[in-house]
Image (tube, grey):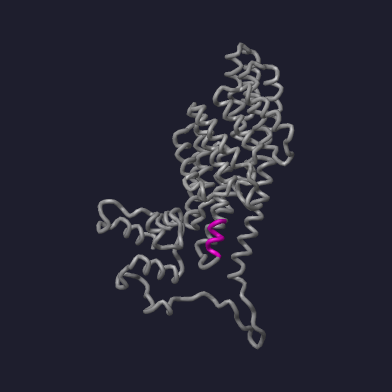
Amino acid sequence: MGTVVRAYRYHPAHGHKALPQETVSRWLGTVTQSQLSRIESGRNRVDTLDKLIHYARSLKMPADLLWFELPESAEETPKRSADVFALPDGPLVAATSVHAEGALADSLLETLDSYYSVDNLAGPQSLVNIASQQLRFVENLLSNSHGRHRKQLLYVGARYAEFAGWIYQDTGALNSAMQMSSIALDFAQEASDETLISYILMRRSNIATDAKRPELALKLADAALDKSTCLPPRSRAVALRQRAHAFAQLHQPDDCASTLELAFKSAESSADSEKELAQYCTPEYVEMEAAHCWIELGQSDQAIGTLQHSLAEWKPGFRRDLGLCLARLAVAHASSGQIENALIVADRSLEIARDTKSFRTETQLARIPSILVAKGAEDQARRFDRSIRSLKL
């Protein structure tokens, strides 16, 4: 069927360009673009009769060209097992398959919360393979999912793909991070979840800033804010914060400052629910992220006080990000010519970076030697450069 669908998309009747996979996956209604790509390449197989019949009917394939028979009416389409069955000479038993999808989706989200906790404490390394394996498991569930629980599984799939993208991002595999976030976006769009779509676009923008592509980052942040009036306040705040990051990389201080002001105002609202993805985007969080923007814009003195205040209130469950915050503070001290303070803080950050292997933390620390050289501290720069290189061993 994968070969047939590909031939269908490339048929001359559709014009000089092939039909996009996104279009055909929408017509089929049961797969995402990425799943259809795997079906066409043979990595995923359409191996049940009811799926073959669904594909044939959705794409209006002539019955005489098929290698299987189409039922004369929808009623004759092969059906799943009934929700209730009778034991031989025994009672009726309620089948659990339909209800299990919902319970399994809830369980997978609980598991994902535990992965977030591990990531916050220990960094991404231990989770790279796990995140990808779990995503494949969810994709397999979706390939056989129909009815009212499918949307719930799509949400779960988007969350796992977004998390896998985050894990890849913090290991420095930015291309893989973008690919995973693209899968997440497919799922969110199929689920028609506007808040989740916005969040994933914000995350794609964040990956773009790590890749030093501020123009792309700004476009993605603007796309995340496209329906900002419909977003929960903190979802709007986290997208505005990312827009400010893009402006900082573009060296547009006025646009950055005005966007941060809007982010502060949105973050002051309480989260709509405990399940809101951006509930972490508090005014304190925006303030800390603003300090990162000020460093990018060369306003290090302004950043130091903010970062010190954030560190005084730090929660121990976020050790990986503690290393990142310390690295940013070390960069700010170095940029302000406070060499001794910079090295003290940087050494603390290095201790955490050795354990968490956070690409974002290492990237900030790697900026320090060149700043020290510019400040005339060449001996300190050489010593610290050797320490950074030891992280790669």
Image quarter of residue 1: bottom left
Total numbered labels: 0
The answer to whether residue 180 is seen in the rendering is no
In front of the other: 215 or 383: 215
In front of the other: 233 or 101: 233
The relative height of residue 162 versus residue 300 in the rendered view (above or below) is below
Taking the magenta stretch, the answer to whether it contains residue 267 is: no
Q: Which span is picked out in magenta?
A: 149-155
Q: Position of residue 7 (x, y in %)?
A: 32, 58
* Apparent side of residue 16 relative to residue 68 in the rendered image (left or right): left
The answer to whether residue 338 is seen in the rendering is yes
The relative height of residue 147 versus residue 205 in the rendered view (above or below) is below
Q: Position of residue 147 (x, y in %)?
A: 51, 68
* Apparent side of residue 24 relative to residue 201 in the rendered image (left or right): left
Please name the residue shown 37% across and 73% down the image.
68
Q: Position of residue 204 (x, y in %)?
A: 50, 42
Q: Position of residue 273 (x, y in %)?
A: 64, 53
